[in-house]
Amino acid sequence: MLNVAIIGCGYWGNHLVRNFYTSTLWNVKYICDKDKNQLDKISSKYSNITSLTNPEQIFDDATIDAVVIATPVFSHFELAKKSLLSNKHTWVEKPLAASSEEAKELIEIAKSRNLILHVDHTYIYTPAVRKIKELIDNNVLGDMLYFDSTRVNLGLFQHDINVIWDLAPHDISILQYTIGKKPISVSATGKSFYKYNNKDIASISFIYIEFDDGSIAHINVNWMSPVKIRQIIMGGSSKMLVFDDMETVSKIKVYDSGVDFKKREDIYDVLIQYRTGDMYSPAIKNYEALSFECNHFYDSIVKDIETDTNGETGLYVVSILEAADKSLTLGGTPIQI
Ligand SMILES: NC(=O)c1ccc[n+]([C@@H]2O[C@H](COP(=O)([O-])OP(=O)(O)OC[C@H]3O[C@@H](n4cnc5c(N)ncnc54)[C@H](O)[C@@H]3O)[C@@H](O)[C@H]2O)c1
């Protein structure tokens, strides 16, 4: 067993404590939240875990192997840096940091101390996203042409980050893990309908990404939708796929549909042929992603290998978020990355 401490016991921290606590590989030694009321709510369920309102004791405790950081985004860098500098393997919630500069510094510290830096891009550990990667890796879809994602619902409005930093990390991490192309340009438009501390916080955004091979991605994130939609369409040259995370059974559907552009020798125009074939829904396993991820984090530490969502993948996500945010403030100007 390895000893772990969890900092930040809010909405997501609650899920993390439950999963680490029920794992046979981990011993949760401390939970920490600066809000005593929040801490008491969770510690009442786990009387054998020491609860703290200040994380310093965690960093000073040489028996702690790993630290999990589930606090708001703007505190990730400071806490993760302290954790790594105290020689703890470190799990940071998505997004890894509030800027790519911060993300790069964390990667460097982890590398120089031979520590695991893991980013919780939870979707990557879901059975559905693992299946999508398998289909793409086995070339079932052909060359990937586009990725089009819709992640909309009513709330939860955040005070410290806009909708891009809140929701788009999920889509960008799925894009990175399954398709993994190099982005060259990002633009974003959107709208803020309210201010917090005199600062506009965008609650709707449309992000457009171009990749070095000519493929494209579009991500629609929105806190002001009357319905909850979690849908991604991936278009390949051979087949197309729809991932609907709101479906309970057939989350993934693969369509033998596409468009063939055939050159005709006698004319300059291309001949467009549409294909509409069968649709099938591959079987996917059933397990809780966080539980799988806790085991994966443990394995990576004991075997000294990177996790599937390491610091570099965290940086990939943060650099796109950062460019989208910058483009948003410039009214949609494309930002080269
Ligand atoms: N992986 C996922 O699918 C997923 C889902 C939701 C949230 N998150 C991420 O989890 C993190 C937390 O989000 P949340 O929704 O749980 O927020 P939350 O506001 O519900 O919880 C954050 C908690 O951190 C505590 N906190 C803040 N600063 C602290 C500090 N310096 N030391 C100790 N405690 C501190 C707060 O008191 C609060 O209880 C964010 O980074 C968010 O992006 C990830």
Image (cartoon, rainbow, N blue to C red):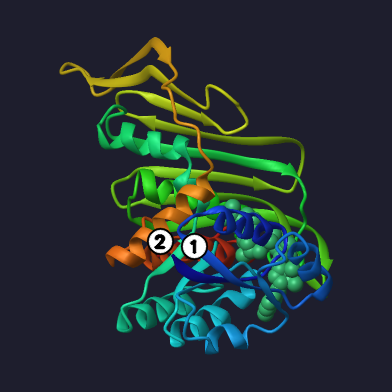
Q: Is residue 218 above or below residue 259?
A: below
Spot the residue most to the front: 48
- Which amino acid does the dot numbered 1 rest on? Trp
Task: Kindly tell me whether residue 305 is visible in this rendering.
Answer: no
Q: Residue 224 appears at what percent x and percent y?
A: 77, 45
The earlier-in-sequence mark between 2 and 1 is 1
Spot the residue most to the left: 265
Give the residue drawn at x 66%, y 58%.
12
> Residue 26, labelled with which disc?
1
Give the residue drawn at x 57%, y 82%.
58
> Residue 298, labelled with which disc?
2
Circle 1 packing at 10 Å, graded few (<14), some (14-19), many (20+), is: many
Q: Which quadrant would residue 21 be assigned to in this image?
A: bottom right
Q: Quadrant of the C terminus?
A: bottom left
Front residue of 59 and 256: 59
Q: Which quadrant would residue 118 be assigned to in this image?
A: bottom left
Front residue of 20 and 228: 20
> Disc 2 vs disc 1: Cβ atoms closer than 8 Å?
yes
Front residue of 178 and 3: 3
Secondary element under disc 2, as helix, strand or loop, is: helix
- Which amino acid does the dot numbered 2 rest on? Tyr
Q: Viewed as shown, does residue 66 lie left or right of 21?
A: left
Task: Kindly tell me whether residue 5 is visible in this rendering.
Answer: yes
Front residue of 317 and 220: 317
Instruction: Give the image quadrant in which the ligand numbered 1 is located.
Output: bottom right
